[in-house]
């Protein structure tokens, strides 16, 4: 068990942004040799607390002590020098340099000013060996997966004598094997007495790795608990501040498949495929139907979506929309036929961080109208207000810059953008990744009600429960091939889905 | 009950794939393909080397007296100043920047040298260090503006280009001949390598610059920081590297190299003139790019730049051997080569991402 003296103590932390009280009177402590999860919904103040700790923001009130001494960091570099290192989901390393260099750059072993490459490589291999990572340290970092890059970042952090390691959503983009690997490294570091602050939205992961957790809600401290003493349901209750009825409400199964499939097919893809990307598949989506796509990361889920949206060109097969064969050569052509695509990569492919919520929301509608016919300001306000309320986007300020919103709210803005063009097929690629349970439930509820209203939805998610909860039928992808199409009846469970993914549909 | 909650993401730990899962290979050595991908950074340099070799072979088959060592050495002799300037440009481009002022700084250096040596009778041993200092100071000033005011290098060095070119004409509008003994002695010195082969002192200076630049880029912190800044400036900052110092340093180096190139050019031309080295910045950039350095920064080698300069020089040589082609064909070939090499870079970076 952790010794009783915390290495890091934050007490009475307050942080205010214009119009928002991000943190009020938050206490937090971290013991050496423990993994401590920081929990809370989006906007609860987790990111702010981490940024305050690492010197990105200064604090309005309260104090931070490290090893008993009061500290205040002006920037992340100072925090790092004091022994607090942060590894973000996006790896902040130089992919063009070798693995060894990324670990040692700025502190290379030298003799008379000359870098000792051999020594550097030897020490890099040794250090990575300590983390159970046996890789060629002379290869450029870009040759490795994101998971390995993250571990190289951790190795660098640890070697700069980190006593406190902050891991902010490190697992969001990793697959199961990679997460295991990361956890092995975390356990090893923990045994060496390093204190680890861990943020993740995956509750299973928290329960697997964390010893203790601190829960925040609306910028306030809810409490600190031992993981072993707090059940998942209680945890979620504390995070969202209410019981789980909101989530269980949706538990009823979606309508019978047969009933839905009696309606008009909206999109029919016949032997549609793209060489090197996804094998030819046949898929029909009816009006009012939610089709789920399940499969591992990289199994071709996104590729299917991109083909249907015209973002990639099909090399074989054909598509008809509303009964007429069409060529979806560009996203523009797809949009014109009522197809909307919410990308999984909301930062890179969707939102424009420096525009306001209003501008981001009206973007697609404006594009559909053509730029020569601006949407009147009054109409914009009407639409934007309507969707801010419907989706409960917070803060409910249309003039807020999107980059200042939390992840879940950014996702809602992206959804709103596509909803106002009133698409007939909405493609959602991982709409709930990296957002908290409350927002997740809201988005799921929204999808269900949109389908009730007659919209066709293609729902892609790595979370099988979620796919099952929403879909009328589920397409299973494996190795870039659609291996099965299963009606969502009483027999279909996450277990069956996992088996299908594992066996590739052969029974 | 608990399964209602979002429990397992793509990383749901429950059973489906344990530590020995299909992606467990991430621990092992990178796949062969991954390593090859990593080595792709050498492809552009090798392509330039192959091109150079091919040009030499074709030239040797087509023209008598082409396939001699002196032809290659002449390329060095005639382009020593360009080589030095292009080395400075390599540093700048490796950080993802650009320096348009180099040609003008070369001209200004010849002009200052000529006016002080011929007009004022200053000794060359004073003039040359002074000129080098002025070049470095100009580069330092531009680098500081680029970094501290966060302005595009393109526009800052464009301003520097006009400034330096304009300053030439405040010294004089006509060409000033240099008749100083030291200069003429250096200009006429031949260093014999064998009975038929010789080089000029300028070539030795240029090769010394190549060696020093290679050492700096690969064996000093400054050099590695240059690559890091070019790879990802934001990350370099977060890793605690001296980004400001590095960026200012590369423009200072480029300014110094331009001034040194100007000194070499004044040996070569034995004159100072405001119209010397017009457009040399573009030749230098072309040489660096043909040498395989990515314009986006972070990837490239001094050796590549040497090969790039040789390619440009050899094109000129071939065209002069051909005799019937006008010298504008040089530009046409350089233009086509640039297209090809930029496309090659694009393909490689696209594959990498």
Image (spheres, coloured by chain):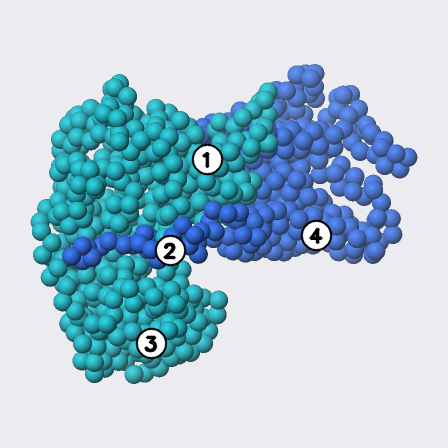
Chain colours: A cyan, B blue
Is B154 or A183 nearer to us in this picture?
A183
Residue that label 1 marks: A130
Residue that label 4 marks: B51
Q: Chain of mark 2?
A: B
In the figure, A348 relative to B189: above or below? below
> Marks 1 and 4, Cα distance to the nearest angstrom?
45 Å
In the figure, A398 relative to A119: above or below? below
Residue that label 2 marks: B17
Mark 1 and mark 3, same subunit?
Answer: yes
Local packing at callout 4 (Cα closer than 10 Å; few below 14, some 14-19, many 20+) is: some
Which dot, 1 or 4, sits closer to the camera? Answer: 1
Residue drawn at x 38%, y 52% is: B18
Name the spot of residue A132 as percent of width and height, x first: 46, 40
Mark 2 and mark 3, same subunit?
Answer: no
In the figure, A408 relative to B278: above or below? below
Q: Chain of mark 3?
A: A
- Residue A283 marker: 3
Which dot, 1 or 3, sits closer to the camera? Answer: 1
In the figure, A377 relative to B303: above or below? below
> Marks 1 and 2, Cα distance to the nearest angstrom?
24 Å
Local packing at callout 2 (Cα closer than 10 Å; few below 14, some 14-19, many 20+) is: some
Which callout, 1 or 3, points at the residue further toward the start of the chain? 1
Q: Chain of mark 1?
A: A
Residue drawn at x 35%, y 51% is: A173
Q: Is residue A456 visible?
A: no
Name the spot of residue B125 as percent of width and height, x first: 69, 17
Please, what secondary structure does the residue beneath circle 3 have? strand
Please, what secondary structure does the residue beneath circle 1 have? helix
């Amino acid at each position: 068990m952790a010794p009783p003296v915390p290495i890091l103590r934050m007490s009475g932390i307050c942080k205010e942004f214009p119009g928002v009280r991000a943190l009020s009177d938050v206490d937090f402590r971290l013991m050496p040799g423990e993994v401590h999860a920081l929990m809370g919904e989006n906007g609860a103040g987790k990111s702010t607390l981490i940024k305050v700790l690492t010197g990105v923001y200064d604090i309005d009130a309260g104090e931070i002590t490290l090893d008993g001494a009061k500290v205040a960091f002006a920037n992340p570099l100072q925090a790092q020098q004091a022994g607090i290192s942060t590894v973000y989901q996006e790896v902040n390393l130089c992919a063009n340099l070798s693995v060894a260099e990324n670990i040692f750059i700025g502190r290379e072993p030298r003799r008379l000013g000359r870098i000792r490459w051999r020594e550097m490589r030897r020490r890099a291999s040794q250090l990575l060996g300590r983390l159970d990572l046996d890789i060629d340290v002379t290869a450029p970092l870009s040759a490795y997966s994101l998971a390995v890059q993250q571990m190289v970042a951790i190795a660098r952090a640890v070697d700069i004598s980190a006593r406190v390691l902050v891991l902010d959503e490190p697992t969001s983009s990793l697959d199961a094997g990679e997460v295991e690997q990361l956890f092995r490294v975390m356990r090893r570091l923990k045994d060496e007495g390093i204190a680890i602050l861990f943020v993740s939205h995956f509750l299973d992961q928290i329960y697997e790795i964390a010893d203790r957790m601190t829960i925040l809600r609306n910028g306030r401290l809810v409490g600190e608990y031992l993981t072993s003493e707090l059940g998942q349901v209680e945890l979620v209750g504390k995070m969202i501040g209410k019981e789980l009825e909101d989530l269980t409400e949706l538990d009823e199964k979606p309508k019978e498949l047969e009933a839905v499939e009696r309606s008009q097919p909206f999109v029919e893809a016949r032997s549609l495929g793209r060489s090197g990307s996804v094998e030819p598949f046949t898929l029909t989506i009816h009006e009012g139907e939610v089709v789920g796509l399940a499969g591992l990361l990289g199994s071709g889920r996104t590729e299917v979506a991109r083909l249907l949206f015209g973002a990639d060109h099909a090399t074989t097969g054909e598509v008809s929309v509303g009964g007429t064969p069409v060529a979806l050569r560009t996203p523009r052509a797809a949009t014109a036929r009522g197809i909307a695509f919410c990308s999984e990569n909301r930062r890179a492919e969707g939102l424009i961080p420096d525009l306001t919520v209003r501008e981001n929301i009206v973007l697609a509608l404006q594009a559909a109208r053509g730029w020569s016919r601006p949407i009147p300001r009054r109409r914009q306000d009407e639409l934007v207000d309507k969707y801010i309320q419907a989706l409960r986007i917070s803060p409910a300020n249309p003039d807020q810059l999107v980059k200042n919103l939390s992840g879940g709210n950014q996702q809602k803005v992206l959804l709103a953008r596509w909803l106002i063009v009133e698409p007939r097929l909405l493609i959602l690629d991982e709409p709930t990744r990296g957002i908290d349970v409350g927002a997740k439930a809201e988005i799921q509820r929204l999808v269900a009600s949109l389908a009730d209203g007659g919209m066709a939805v293609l729902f892609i998610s790595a979370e099988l429960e979620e796919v099952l909860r929403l879909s009328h039928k589920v397409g299973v992808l494996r190795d870039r091939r659609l291996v099965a199409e299963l009606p969502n009846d009483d027999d279909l469970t996450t277990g069956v889905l996992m088996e299908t993914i594992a066996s590739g549909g052969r029974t | 009950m608990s399964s209602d909650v979002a429990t397992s993401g793509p990383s749901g730990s429950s059973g489906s794939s344990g530590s020995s899962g299909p992606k467990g290979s991430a621990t092992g050595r990178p796949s062969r393909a991954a390593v090859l991908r990593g080595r792709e950074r050498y492809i552009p340099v090798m392509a330039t080397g192959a091109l150079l070799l091919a040009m030499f072979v074709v030239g040797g088959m087509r023209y008598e007296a082409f396939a001699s060592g002196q032809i290659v050495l002449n390329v060095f002799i005639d382009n020593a100043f360009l080589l030095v300037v292009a080395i400075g440009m390599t540093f700048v481009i490796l950080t993802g920047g650009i320096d348009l002022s180099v040609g003008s700084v070369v001209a200004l250096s010849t002009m200052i040298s000529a006016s002080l040596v011929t007009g004022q009778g200053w000794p060359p041993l004073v003039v040359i260090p002074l000129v080098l200092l002025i070049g470095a100071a100009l580069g330092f000033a531009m680098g500081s503006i680029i970094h501290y005011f966060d302005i595009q290098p393109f526009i800052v060095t464009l301003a520097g280009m006009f400034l330096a070119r304009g300053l030439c004409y405040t010294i004089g509008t006509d060409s000033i001949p240099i008749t100083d003994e030291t200069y003429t002695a250096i200009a006429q010195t031949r260093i014999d390598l064998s009975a038929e082969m010789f080089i000029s002192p300028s070539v030795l200076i240029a090769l010394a610059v190549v060696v020093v630049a290679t050492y700096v880029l690969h064996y000093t912190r400054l050099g590695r920081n240059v690559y890091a800044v070019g790879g990802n400036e934001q990350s370099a900052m977060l890793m605690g590297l001296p980004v400001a110092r590095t960026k200012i340093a590369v423009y200072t180096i480029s300014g110094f190299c331009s001034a040194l190139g100007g000194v070499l050019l004044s040996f070569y031309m034995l004159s100072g003139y405001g119209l010397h080295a017009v457009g040399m910045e573009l030749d230098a950039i072309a040489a660096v790019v043909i040498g395989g350095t990515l314009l986006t920064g972070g990837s490239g080698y001094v050796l590549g730049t040497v090969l790039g300069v040789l390619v440009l020089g050899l094109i000129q040589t071939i065209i002069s051997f051909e005799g019937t082609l006008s010298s504008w064909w040089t530009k046409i070939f350089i233009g086509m080569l640039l297209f090809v090499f930029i496309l090659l870079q694009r393909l490689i970076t696209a594959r990498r991402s």
